[in-house]
Image (cartoon, rainbow, N blue to C red):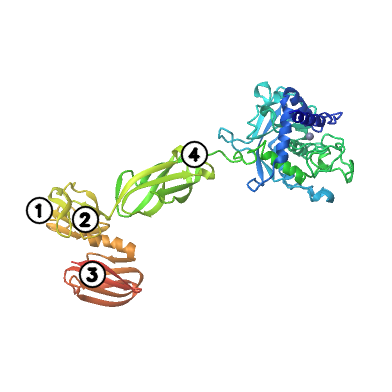
Amino acid sequence: MYHKLKHTVITLVSFSFLVLSTHSMAQKLRCGTMERFEYESKENNALLLQRNSISKALKQWKKNSSTPDSYTIPVVFHIIYKNESEYVSLEQIMSQLEVLNQDFNRSNPDANLTPAQFQDIAADCNISFCLAQRTENNDTTSGITYTQTSISSFSLYDNRIFQDSLGGKTIWNSSDYLNIYVCDLTNALGFSSFPGGNPNRDAVVVDFSNFGTIDIAPPFNKGRTATHELGHWLDLYHIWGGGNCSTDEVDDTPTQETENYGCPVHPSPSCDNNGDMFQNYMDYTNDACMNLFTNGQKERMHATLNTERLGIGNTDFCQLPYEDIGIINNIQPLENQIYCGENLELITSLYNYSENAIIKAKIYYQLDDESPIEFEWTGNIEPNTSQDINLGDQIFSTGEHILKIYSSLPNGFKDINALNDTSYTSFTITQGTNIDFAIQTDNYSEENYWAILNSQNDTVVSGNELVSNEMNTFNYCQDLDSCYTLIIYDIYDDGICCDFGNGFVAVNGQNFSGDFGSELQIDLCNTISIDEVMKSNFVKVYPNPTNDYVMIESKTLIEEVRIYDIYGKNVLQKNCHSNKELVNLYMLSSGAYFLQLLTNNQTQSVKIIKR
Ligand SMILES: [Zn+2]
């Protein structure tokens, strides 16, 4: 116990020394961070102890394979100004941001000025800074706030700058954003908090007269005040440590006696080193004289980003606000609907709950226990509107199914509300083929009724709900296993054409004359076979039924056409060599035949009717 306490006291003493020994300038301090820290420590006695434990944690931190190599920190710039001369333009802010991104990624144009002696340890720190794009409330932000104040200037110890009500700007959550205040700062060019302090004042403050690079007077005109202060914000100490050849807690920076000012001539040795590294951003030299962080400093900053500032370098505040889309319902299939046949077009309705237009999203559909299938949607959905999205044809097995459809990544970003993303639909697929037929009636629809008969001539479904002089449409799911016949009856034996109107019957897109006397029989096997055969075998035969000719179209070359009667007798044979063949049936008597096509070593059959 005694030993532990003693150790703590010794560390505290050495740290206090590091704080108190900081050189003070006659005019403005090059950096007020240590003075500011001393002030904060007086207010919070535990801060020194906390700094100690943080320092230990940083030393213990070792990069492992899962630790990110690069970081992007969202920044909000708070511009506090009283008069026009203190108003910092967007261009000035961008010039400062550019410097930060250069200096922390070793893309600074003056990197070549680093002495050869230090080139090998000069680090690309892989730390970038973005203007925050999203607030914690998921609103869009420019990453810049402007506050006009009645306060003429702020001192290093003035906390009013961190509060709206006191003439400053209330800090944004300092665990999510790096807050950089720009104001008229009287006694230092800038200062920063170290990690672990009061979160309501955890920020970098820079005097407007040395912020950015546009029309700034030398020697602090290259934006390095902010670079330096950000070093502190990421827990770097001044390169001379506490002075008198003490350590800055980084191994590869040469131990040096004290801070350097202006721009010394290299080498400028002290403490038995081969030259102070006064080019380091953590010294006090002129902006034009600074040009590097070291690998050791990089490691310490990465350690900070994985301990005290964990998360802030891997945030989504650099992205636009999250959007909210959702599947409101499915258009097809519909809940509890029975569908005929295995082929179904999936149509869903995507709703935009956001305040911005959505131009892309991912839609997933998942049938029963199968793996989800991804659909990349692009288009445009205005806020608070929906759009039907066709996900394409799908083949389903017969039986009951549950289809899950869900959306994600609106405009490529996380969806803020997962509750409205998903829609479930239960539906049933029955075996069969959909038959659509329509009866255009004449003036006397009460004379008409219809029936569908199976191959044993049993009526499976019938109806007489017909309206005169109208297109009456019906839909029926027919089992493909046997052939059915649709019969349209007229009890006055005068058909539906042409004395009292111009009626006709349409089945699956084929028209049949209404001039039929007492009844019109339509073989549904044939009418459906046109579409079905076309889909499965790439063959189309029409018209069917026919009076004399049939046209045969095939997607592959037709080599031979054979026609068999219902007794299996070959009644016609024709050699061909084309994809489209006209066959004359004039010599055949009325009735059903089987047309057989030999194409590319395949044989396909279509039933045809000769009237
Ligand atoms: Zn400093």
Could you tell me which quadrant the N terminus lies in?
top right
Judge from the rendering whether residue 211 lies leftward or rightward of residue 460; answer left or right: right
- Choose top left, top right, bottom left or bottom right for residue 223: top right
Q: Which residue is mark 2?
A: 505
The residue tagged 4 is 324
Q: Can residue 32 be spotted in the picture?
A: no
Tell me how far mark 1 sits from mark 4, CA to CA: 63 Å
Q: Which residue is mark 1?
A: 492
Which badge, 2 or 4, is on the more N-terminal residue?
A: 4
The amino acid beneath tag 2 is Val
Local packing at callout 1 (Cα closer than 10 Å; few below 14, some 14-19, many 20+) is few
- Classify mark 1: helix, strand or loop: loop
Q: What element does badge 2 sit on?
A: strand
Q: Nearer the viewer, mark 2 or mark 4?
A: 4
Q: In which quadrant is the C terminus drawn? A: bottom left
Question: In this rendering, which labeled residue sits more in front, label 3 or label 2?
Answer: 3
Whichever of labels 3 and 2 marks the residue nearer the N terminus, that label is: 2
* Apparent side of residue 477 relative to residue 57 in the rendered image (left or right): left
